[in-house]
Amino acid sequence: MLPYDATFSEELPLASQSPFFGKRSSTDDSLNSRPAPLVGGGTSLTGSPVSPSSLATAAPVSAPVKEGGSKLTVGPNIKLKGVEITDCDTLVVEGIVEATMDSRVIQIAEQGSFKGSVAIDIAEIRGLFDGDLTAREKLVIHSTGKVTGKIRYGKIVIEEGGQLSGEVSVGTDKGDSSSAGKLQAAA
């Protein structure tokens, strides 16, 4: 067996040297070894910063809800009962939840069900909601959604087939209600 000699490994052809092990030279860290930037990732193809005003002219993204922050998903066949949900930016309900919550976004899936009290910025309902719902910014009831109880909202969208019944009022503050009363509607 030959003793290790640092010059021996440098004399080997490049094909026999592993690119994952060994010492890196400063020439290995060139611009050619970097991955290409993602489209819309905040840099142009030349690597210079993109101004925010140029992003405003880009095509809008079809996601109505901003992602990010803390997110809790209650999966199918899961039952979460008798809790207060705090410090959660987005709650996704695919199972059954009985709780109170004050947060940013709630998304109830088609097979999901929520019973309780919610004060939220944006509510997207594809499943069932029963209780006290305050959607400060927007309430979206999809065609498979059914919302019952005491409902307050800033703006509302109900797809054809979506159901809304109970005490419904526009505005999220008690003094801001410009339209209140019993309402039972099926779009």
Image (cartoon, rainbow, N blue to C red):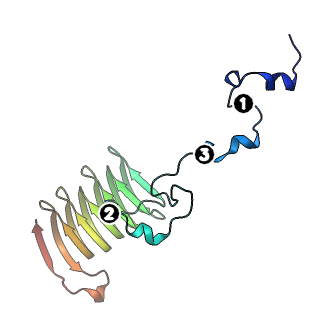
Residue at image x 33%, y 68%?
122
- Element carrying mark 3: loop
Amino acid at circle 3: Arg
Residue at image x 23%, y 80%?
170
Which quarter shows the N terminus? top right
| Image position of 11 with respect to 127: above or below | above
Q: Are marks 1 and 2 in contact (CB under 8 Å)?
A: no
Q: Quadrant of residue 167?
A: bottom left
**Residue designated by label 3:** 34
Mark 3 surroundings within 10 Å by alpha-carbon count, few (fewer than 14), some (14 through 19), many (20 or more): few
Most distant residue in the top direction: 1
Q: Which mark is residue 75?
A: none
**Residue designated by label 2:** 64
Which percent across, then down, holds residue 180?
A: 18, 83
Q: Which mark is residue 21?
A: 1
Q: Quadrant of residue 166?
A: bottom left
Q: Earlier in the sequence, mark 1 or mark 2?
A: 1
Q: Quadrant of residue 177?
A: bottom left
Q: Earlier in the sequence, mark 1 or mark 3?
A: 1
Amino acid at circle 2: Pro
Nearest the eye: 156 or 127: 156
Which percent across, then down, holds residue 64?
A: 32, 63
